[in-house]
Amino acid sequence: MIGEEFAAVLAAAQEGSEAAFSVLWRDGNPALLRYLRVAAPDAADDVAAETWVQVIRGLPGFRGDESAWRAWLFTTARRRAIDEGRRRSRHPVASLAEVRRAREPRTEDAAERAMENLGTAAAIAAIVALPPLQAEVILLRVVAGLDTEMVARMVGRTPGAVRVAAHRGLRQLAQALPMKGVTL
Amino acid sequence: MPVFPWSAPGDVPAVGDPAFDALLAGNLPPQDAAAGLRTAAEVIAGLTGAPAISELAGQASALSVFRGAAGMSGEPTRSRPRRHRLLTSLLSAKLAAAVAIAAVTLGGGAVAAAAYTGALPASMQQLAHNTIGAPPAPHSASSALSATPAGPDASGHAAYGLCTAYAHLKAHGSAKQKAVAFRDLAIAAGGAANVTAYCAGVAHPGTSPSGQPASHPTGKPSSMPSQAPTGHPSGRASTVPSQAPTTGQPTSHPTGKPTSIP
């Protein structure tokens, strides 16, 4: 979250300021990667990079506050993740759930990242184990910081259904064994 | 029922419980969570933890894409002399540019500038067209050579970008954004009084000699076939260092007020 300075940072980035763009990128990219490690497990880095290419192209025309910015960022990432899933599986794909089932997650990546940030890697592993809708809804609420109405629009469900899916996912997480070795 | 002081999970609330809404909103850290919710709270905390080094590793690559795109839209006049020097040295380093664009699959920076002067081989020009919306590869060799480095394209892009940015902000932007855009436009035009004439004369940029317009930064993908990857010959995009200057150094790119008007 950038907060109060968002409007100034955005305007400067739209004028070509690399420093301002770096602020937007450093704020958004880790969250993007965490979402994509679940939405596009084999291709998170590639899809994140493609997302930024598209966002950079559209940056001069973007108008909105920080939550609109995050909605645009993650909507773009979500569409690219679905496109990537279609490319790889070569079947027409109707939903993110099918995209994820078509791939196997690469456990070596998870192990590498675990060395750097054990809490995050373990959290992602727990989310990946959830049913796809619950996983996506929790990520969009928590990692993307989007509200229930925006998440509902993105995933094509009612806000009530989104809330139920998020709660069910959290219940399942709560019932899992406590994670070993996580220090907070 | 006995209470165990160690890892007893406790009861997990039902769907609809406000504790879940608090977790989702980031208002319930693990140390404040009831035993039944602690694991869920720890997952949330892990998801929202500080960035890891690996999550920030792609910054140089993203900046080079950003720099390339900045070359398409308007930039304040002060940066033009720098771009001119860059373009002149690029013509003699055409081969280096071809190698760079193959390595930095997203293109950008100095290579992107070359994409606008016809300094790239046709296959690389087409890659630049697909990734950053540079003009498509020209069909005839002679049209590629006729573009000059310091010629109308450089100022044409800046003028078009500045004029359209100001026009858009006049309709939709805040007073501050409008003022900033007008200031940059006035500098490029050589005075506020010249702005109307300056904008009246700008041609549509990116019109290659064959007359096809380049793609605009509207946020929609450019016309790529859906089955082709967006210029990823090696399949990995974010780990190759670009040839642009590192981000730690201050550049001469203006980020605020110009200090002199040429």
Image: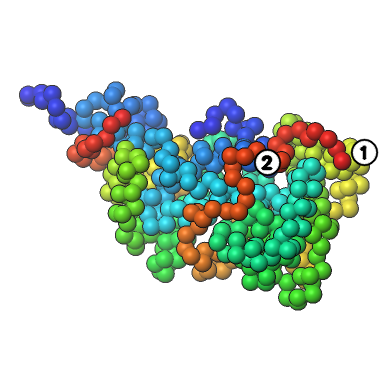
Residue displayed at 50% across by 48% down? B58
Q: Which quadrant of the figure contains the C terminus of chain B?
A: top right
Going from N to C along the chain, the mark reached first, 2 or 1, is 1
Identify which amino acid the numbered label 1 is placed on.
Ala
Residue displayed at 53% across by 45% down? B59
> Which mark identifies residue B251?
2
Q: Is residue B77 visible?
A: yes
State whether residue A165 is above or below residue B23: below
Q: CA distance from mark 2 to mark 1?
A: 31 Å
B203 horizontally vs A66: left or right: right
Residue A92 in which image quadrant: bottom left
Indicate the secondary structure of the residue bearing disc 2. loop
Q: Position of residue A82 (x, y in %)?
A: 45, 58
Classify mark 1: residues with Cα within 10 Å, few (<14), some (14-19) or many (20+). Answer: few
- Which chain is mark 1 on? B
State whether residue A108 is above or below residue A121: below
Residue occupied by mark 1: B193
Q: Position of residue B34 (x, y in %)?
A: 24, 25
Classify mark 2: residues with Cα within 10 Å, few (<14), some (14-19) or many (20+). Answer: few
Identify which amino acid the numbered label 2 is placed on.
Thr
B50 horizontally vs A122: left or right: right
Residue B147 in which image quadrant: bottom right
- The reply to whether callout 2 and callout 1 are in contact (CB within 8 Å) is no
> Which mark identifies residue B217?
none
